[in-house]
């Protein structure tokens, strides 16, 4: 920054999220650095920096360069709306702009704060005060030119515990008709941040409700107003239960120090675990609302949710079995899990596992306000660990090569026998290779 100032820059400012996070005291604030340079042309900036740093010219039309891979440096730019959606802008870099002019096009005031190298704050729109009040407020009327900003508000609410102020909520509602212009990839990007970075994910869901953007995600919208059995869910409808569950999932993820991928899976499983309740809703003979078989019914709408935003395939494939099995613990007649049930549960949960399932069940139970005691998961976890299926599904002990060594010929009959052997293994009819081979011989003699 000093090189640019010595080279004639009128001002050099840290901008955007790095300033916001620094002022919030977030440790990783310096991880993603954005700098705006005023008073120097694009070519002049490159000439000043190139002798000292690696400079990648990656966005000349936007007035942007990357310095040593870790810093995004740009000239302020004028933008004019040319069409609908997130991409319909004409951009012209203009180093003569003032910071106030440039910052007016940023989404929220908390992202429209600049900071000089000497820590001087430049805050033309009151963003520092909004940070203190935990308020998300549109910087200017330019907010209404980009519908993606509503979803950014959703994930900012979830990450930082911010509330959107009323006028900005109205601007978000006015943008709902432009949801269809957003690319699925950009929508997924905001949901991804909601899942892996949020401390208060329920506030992100509440933001969608207040802005009416929950309508844009029908699998979530249908949970609004869907009643539940009052003895087990004194918290209210399915949407309220889901908000409590996702907040509980954050605490569980933190307690277990989950990786980013595992946290992503857990948060989305918590978000979608009850999406099958609306379509299975009935009154039972006692007059209470209930949703029988909602776990299995939730698999398809959860898949539709991910498909609508082109989420990575592995995310849906891990989340769906967790949703399908999240009530398995409640179906057992006793607190003691059997070895057979545990092995089969591990098999059904693949490519996820019993460890993740237990975390979802814990989050779900925490999200229920009830006077009834929760069933312990310890019998499942203890047994799964002893059986070696806590993290991975059972592996078939009997392989095709074993049958060939016993004299069996390749073909459909061998395939049938291998499947039967694996089923017998899951049922505990044998526990090692030697006893498994004896089982195979005995079965072939019977047939």
Image: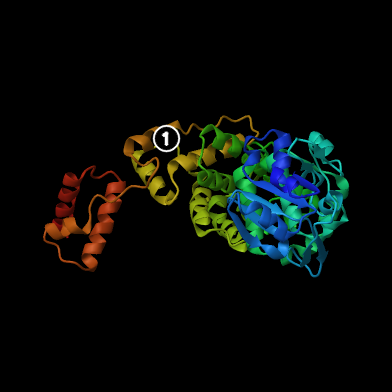
Image quadrant for the C terminus? bottom left
* Residue 182 shows in the view: no
Q: 70 and 67: which one is in front?
A: 67
Q: Position of residue 428 (x, y in %)?
A: 28, 43
Give the residue number, with chain letter if any, for mark 1.
381
Position of 401 compared to 46: left or right? left
- Position of 131 compared to 251: left or right? right
191 sits left or right of 416 in the view: right
Residue under the point 63% across and 29% down: 371
x, y percent for residue 232: 63, 37
Counting from the top left corner in percent of width and height, residue 298 is at: 57, 54
Q: Which x, y percent locates residue 425?
A: 27, 48
Q: Is residue 191 above or below residue 414?
A: above
Q: Secondary structure at mark 1?
A: helix
Which picture quadrant has residue 334?
top left
Give the tally of numbered discs: 1
Q: What's the colour scheme?
A: rainbow
Q: Kindly identify the residue that appears in the image at 77 percent across and 49 percent down.
A: 9
């Amino acid at each position: 920054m000093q090189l640019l100032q010595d080279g004639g820059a009128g001002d050099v400012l840290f901008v955007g999220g790095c300033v916001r996070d620094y002022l919030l005291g977030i440790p990783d604030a310096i991880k993603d650095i954005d700098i705006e340079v005023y008073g120097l042309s694009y070519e002049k900036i490159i000439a000043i920096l190139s002798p000292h740093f690696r400079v990648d010219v990656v966005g000349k039309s936007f007035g942007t360069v990357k310095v040593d891979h870790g810093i995004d440096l740009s000239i302020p730019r004028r933008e004019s709306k040319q069409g609908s959606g997130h991409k319909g802008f004409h951009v012209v870099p203009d180093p003569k702009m003032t910071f106030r002019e440039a910052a007016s096009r940023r989404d929220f005031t908390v992202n429209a704060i600049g900071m000089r190298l000497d820590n001087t704050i430049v805050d033309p729109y009151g963003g520092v005060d909004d940070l203190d009040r935990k308020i998300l407020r549109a910087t200017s009327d330019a907010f209404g030119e980009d519908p993606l900003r509503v979803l950014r508000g959703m994930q900012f609410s979830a990450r930082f515990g911010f509330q959107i102020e009323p006028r900005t909520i109205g601007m978000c509602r006015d943008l709902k008709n432009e949801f269809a212009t957003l690319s699925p990839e950009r929508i997924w990007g905001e949901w991804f941040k909601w899942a892996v970075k949020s401390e208060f994910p329920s506030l992100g869901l509440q933001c969608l409700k207040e802005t009416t953007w929950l309508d844009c995600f029908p699998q979530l919208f249908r949970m609004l107003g869907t009643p539940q059995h009052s003895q087990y869910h004194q918290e209210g409808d399915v949407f309220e239960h889901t908000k409590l569950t996702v907040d509980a999932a954050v605490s569980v993820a933190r307690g277990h120090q989950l990786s980013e991928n595992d946290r992503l899976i857990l948060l989305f499983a918590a978000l979608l675990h009850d999406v099958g309740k609306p379509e299975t809703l009935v009154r039972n003979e006692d007059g209470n609302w209930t949703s029988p078989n909602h776990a299995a019914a939730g698999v398809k709408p959860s898949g539709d949710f991910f498909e609508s935003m082109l989420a990575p395939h592995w995310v849906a494939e891990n989340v769906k079995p967790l949703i399908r099995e999240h009530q398995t613990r409640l179906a057992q007649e006793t607190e003691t899990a059997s070895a057979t049930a545990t092995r089969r549960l591990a098999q059904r949960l693949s490519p996820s596992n019993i460890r993740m399932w237990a975390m979802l069940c814990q989050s779900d139970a925490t999200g229920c306000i009830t006077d009834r005691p929760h069933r312990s998961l310890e019998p499942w976890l203890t047994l799964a660990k002893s059986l070696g299926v806590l993290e991975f599904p059972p592996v078939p002990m009997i392989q095709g090569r074993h049958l060939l060594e016993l004299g069996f010929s390749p073909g459909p009959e061998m395939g049938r026998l291998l499947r039967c052997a694996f089923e017998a293994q899951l049922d505990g009819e044998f526990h090692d290779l030697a006893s498994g081979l004896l089982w195979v011989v005995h079965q072939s003699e019977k047939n």
